Image: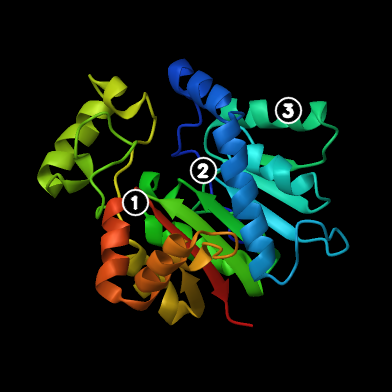
Amino acid sequence: MSTEPPHIASTSHWNHSSDPNFSNYYEQQSVSDETVQRFSLVRDKALQLLGANAADVTRVLEVVDVGCGAGTQSRLWAEMGHRVHGLDVNAPLINVARRRAAESGLEIAFDVGSATELPYADSSMDVALLPELLEHVANWQGCLDEAIRVLKPGGLLYLSTTSWLCPKQQEFNLPLYSWYPAFLKRRYERLAVTTRPEIANHCKYPAVNWFSFYALERYLGPRGFACLDRFDMVELRDRSALAKTVLTLVRGLAPLRLLGHVLTPGSTIFALKAP
């Protein structure tokens, strides 16, 4: 009889090692100004949707950062006093995350594990962050279902992932890869894990799924989520008159919103779970 807690199965089928080229690259990239600014913006937008703000530290949230890598996003939440749990399949990057948290004097629970087998109780998290993750998990539905399971009613799910609508992407070092037919993508996925790892930046689990905001909304909507895309989340305040006009048109006209997604790499969703 298993003595493991509910929802925790053996993760022995996952390879928790990492190519040094991959780990070293993401260890450095994780502290770049661009990365810190991007994750800070995500945090502040999430707090805004939850009715909090970046200056209010009286409400302590339970936050899970799934696919946390070297832990930059986790630290940004922990610095505000929130209770943060970070999980990643990549053991070397988790070691970096633990070291950086200790050096910063932050208490963050970092674990090596699988996004499809989260070691957290049902309805235990206020915020679930899934940055650049779904594309790498073959069972992406199981990954999303686990995030949904651990979220409290009224909680917030944030995810960023690939987009098949936009030809620009960073997963494979190949031009227009998002638009390749499925059979050709399968070929390059095999090459990425055998003889040509450089085409996927030496990633142990290269991207195998390609999404759009619309497809993810169709999955999350029936599960009780109200979904917002990147255009919904852009602040109009302090924008020029022209920018305000363009954003208003994009939000109001479905063809223009679709064009906006075609022109912007990646799919981004902020999704609020029904209370």
Residue 180 lies, in percent from the top left, at 14, 44
Residue type, label 2: Thr
Instruction: Find the residue positioned furthest to the front.
Output: 241
Residue type, label 3: Arg
Q: Secondary structure at mark 3?
A: helix
| Residue located at (68% from left, 70% from top) | 50
Among numbered discs 2 and 1, the one appearing first in the sequence: 2
Residue 2 visible in the displayed image: no
Instruction: Give the residue pinned by disc 1.
Output: 264
**How many dots with numbers?**
3
Instruction: Give the residue pinned by disc 2.
Output: 11
Q: Secondary structure at mark 1?
A: loop
**Residue 156 got which mark?**
none
Residue type, label 1: Thr
Nearer to us: label 2 or label 3: 3
Q: Are marks 3 and 1 in contact (CB under 8 Å)?
A: no
Q: Are marks 2 and 3 in contact (CB under 8 Å)?
A: no
Residue 164 lies, in percent from the top left, at 25, 53
Choose top left, top right, bottom left or bottom right for residue 8. Answer: bottom right
Q: CA distance from mark 2 to mark 3?
A: 25 Å
Q: CA distance from mark 3 to mark 1?
A: 32 Å
14 left or right, relative to 53? left
**Residue 100 got which mark?**
3
Q: Secondary structure at mark 2?
A: loop
